[in-house]
Amino acid sequence: MNVVLDANALVMPFQYRINIDIELKRLLGDVDIYVPECVIGELKKLSERRREGKMALQLANKYRTVKTSGRGDKGVLEAAKKLNAYVVTNDKEFIKQLIKEGIRVIYMKQNHLVMRDD
C-alpha cells in the first residue's frame, strides 16, 4: 500500500500533534510513504519563514521521495497516479480534484486521520 503526503500533511504533526506514521498504520496497516520532490521544494521555502516548515522538512526526509514533472498539487497528483497511492491532505479544493481523478484521499478530522469514502 502506497501513500503520498502533500505539504500540509507534513505540517499537520507540528500544528495538531498527530503522528502520521501511527495513524496511517491504524488505517491501512503497513504502508510505503512517499513525498514528491516538488513538496520538498515547497517545504524548503516554508522552512525559511516558519518553524513548522523546518520540522516538516526534517520529517519529509525520513520518507522516500518520488520524482515528478509537475509542481504543487499537480506533482502530488502525478505521484499518486504513478504509485497508485492514497494522498494525505487537508486541502479541501485539492481533495475535490483528487476524488474527480479517482485518487483515494486521507484527511485529518478531530486530530486523527480518516479515509474519504466516496
Image (spheres, helix red, strand yellow):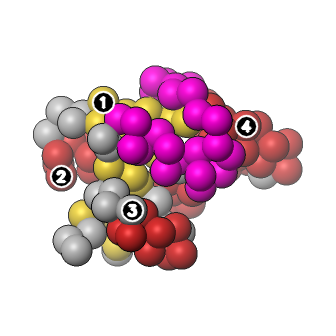
- Residue mark closest to the camera, 4 vs 2: 4
Based on the picture, tell me whether residue 62 belongs to the magenta stretch. Answer: yes
The dot on residue 27 is 2
For the residues labelled 2 and 1, the Cα–Cα distance comes to 13 Å
Residue picked out by circle 3: 101
Is 110 above or below relative to 55?
below
Q: Earlier in the sequence, mark 2 or mark 1?
A: 2
Residue 116, image x and y in percent?
Answer: 27, 69
Mark 1 vs 3, N-terminal side: 1
Tell me if residue 71 can be seen.
yes
Q: CA distance from mark 4 to mark 1?
A: 21 Å
Q: Are marks 2 and 3 in contact (CB under 8 Å)?
A: no
Q: Quadrant of the C terminus?
A: bottom left
Magenta span covers which residues?
Answer: 60-83
Point out the tag, 4 or 2, that comes first from the N-terminus: 2
Which residue is pictured at 26% across the width and 46% down the height?
A: 24
Residue at x-position 52% and y-position 26% = 65
Residue type at the position of mark 4: Gly
Tell me the residue that label 4 is attached to: 41
From the top left corner, tell me how far across and down residue 59 is, in percent: 54, 34
Mark 2, residues whose alpha carbon is within 10 Å: few (<14), some, or many (≥20)? few
The tag on residue 32 is 1
User: What percent of the width, then of the height, locates residue 57?
Assistant: 64, 35
In this picture, is 113 found above or below 116?
A: above
Residue 108 is at least partly visible in this image: no
- Three-letter amino acid code of the residue under disc 3: Glu
Of callouts 4 and 1, which one flags the residue occurring earlier in the amino acid sequence?
Answer: 1
